[in-house]
Image (cartoon, helix red, strand yellow):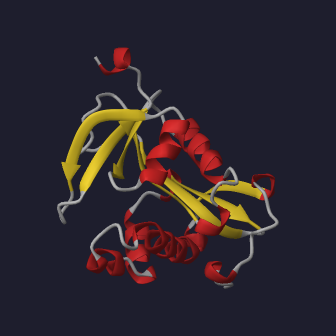
Amino acid sequence: MKSTAKMNHDSKTAADVRIETLTTRRFPQKAELHALTWHETYQGMLPQGFVDMVTPEFALAVTRRHDPSRTLLALQDDEPIGFAEFLDEAGPDISTPEVSELGALYVLGEVQHQGVGKMLLHAALDAMPRRYAALSVVLKNANAIAFYEHMGFHSTGHISLDDFDTPILEMTNATNAACQ
């Protein structure tokens, strides 16, 4: 298996990307991608011990616990470059009623700003059974918040703390009328 960290995607565009539902055959690739994108995203943003905890082995164990039909991979030249995971119904940490939940959306840093995240988000929203979705994002993650705002999400005003006292912002694409 080729390492995603060494792949060169500079000359590629979102047009070269396809989205597919995760299969067990791709679990190891998704886990490697999960660990790599976690480190790229949260280095210096979360406590280092928490960042270091997400190894490919840890991510593989997480992947095996999740429903693969709720995980989408973005592939370029048959190599995963991003993924999204969703829940049909939002979990207990989401305060917005009657929504699905986007649990994760990560894209390799070297292919960000090329439409891959947008493709993954649209594919996940299309696959979700509910009309609206909510998500949780680290409050310090200004890039992710700007992306979700660009994609039609807005803050619900609900901020929680994770296990390491990191502020987490809830966002949704539900309208105010839909939330009442």
Count of numbered badges drawn on the protein: 0
118 w.r.t. 81: above or below? above
- Residue plotted at (41% across, 21% down): 175
| Residue 33 visible in the shown view | yes
84 vs 55, left or right, is right
| Residue 89 visible in the shown view | no
Q: Quadrant of residue 100?
A: top left
78 w.r.t. 173: above or below? below
- Residue plotted at (52% across, 54% down): 84
Q: Position of residue 135 (x, y in %)?
A: 38, 44
119 vs 65, left or right, is right
Q: Quadrant of the C terminus?
A: top left
4 vs 65, left or right, is right
Q: Quadrant of the N terminus?
A: bottom right
Q: Position of residue 131 (x, y in %)?
A: 47, 27
Q: Position of residue 6 (x, y in %)?
A: 67, 83
Q: Nearer the viewer, residue 158 or 15?
A: 158
103 w.r.t. 172: above or below? below
